[in-house]
Image (cartoon, helix red, strand yellow):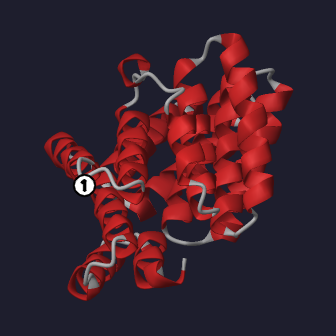
Amino acid sequence: AGADPTALAYADLAAAAIAWASGDLHAAHDRAERCAGALAPTVPTLAATCDELSGDASAAMNDGAAARAAYERGLQLAKQSDSAEAATSLGLALAELDLHDGKLDQAAAEAGALEAQAAERGATSPEARAWVLVARVHVEQAASQQALDDLGHVKPETIEPLEVRLEHQLALGHVNVLLGDPDGMSQIDSARDEAERQGFPGLVLAARLAHLEAATATGDDVSRAQRELATDARAHGYALIAHLAETVADR
């Protein structure tokens, strides 16, 4: 008798999540694509999670079109299965793509709407993700004080996922540097240390990018750090971070 297809799909989902956390982006994408296709007819909520993992891997590899397609597919499944949590998560992922595409007003509006929905449900982690995204938009719009106000809505001790907690810390450190607070860099470096201890290479690279962006804003010579980050990120498949490092002075 052959293996149970549903059991195989669950195994693919678990493997995709592990591969994503450990920085194996191609494996994360491929296993997530498999589980999304297998689970869509029977367990659409979990298929939406697979689509989100696939989109995350594609986004990290700087394939925005593939990421958007996966997120939109997952969002449709989440809505069909009335999963507000999955729909919020996928909506925020799409809003982040809008941020990277320079659609700042659209990203802020969508993240703001999703924040309000998450707050109404008492979903603290999705609400925190939304505030961080709104703050990042405000940083891009040179509204650093507004970004600090956004991040002030988040209570870090209430955030369970490590990724969300560290993303908040990185954003807060960056904003503090922009506002002249000397503790900002130490907040960024502390987040990097935690990511390294927990074994999350993608978060380590994100922390290095945050440090690079903050140092660029203060006028430091970042040419060596810029080259090293772009090289390391590209070597590990994180083409988006490599691109953002290479274009840091243009933003």
Give whichever of 234, 112 is nearer the camera. Answer: 112
Q: Amino acid at mark 1?
A: Met
Give whichever of 106, 153 is nearer the camera. Answer: 153
Is 100 situated left or right of 202 in this image?
right
Q: Residue at x 66, y 60 (%)?
A: 99
Q: Residue at x 28, y 83 (%)?
A: 231
Is 128 situated left or right of 72 in this image?
left
Residue found farthest to the front: 180
Q: Please, is residue 17 above or below residue 61 in the view?
A: above
Q: Is residue 235 visible?
A: yes
Quadrant of the rendering where the C terminus is positioned? bottom right
Q: Please, is residue 186 above or below residue 6 in the view?
A: below
The image shows a total of numbered marks equal to 1
Q: Position of residue 107 (x, y in %)?
A: 73, 52
Is 242 situated left or right of 220 in this image?
right
Q: Please, is residue 176 above or below residue 66 in the view?
A: above
Label 1: state its secondary structure: helix
Give whichever of 2, 129 is nearer the camera. Answer: 129
Quadrant of residue 223 in the image?
bottom left
Q: Residue at x 49, y 70 (%)?
A: 61
Q: Residue at x 39, y 25 (%)?
A: 156
Q: Position of residue 6 (x, y in %)?
A: 58, 30
Q: Position of residue 180 (x, y in %)?
A: 35, 56
Crowd tier of the residue under label 1, counting other residues whose Cα lies within 10 Å: few below 14, some 14–19, many 20 or above = many
Please give the residue where the numbered disc 1 appears in the rendered image: 185
Is 143 situated left or right of 94 in this image?
left
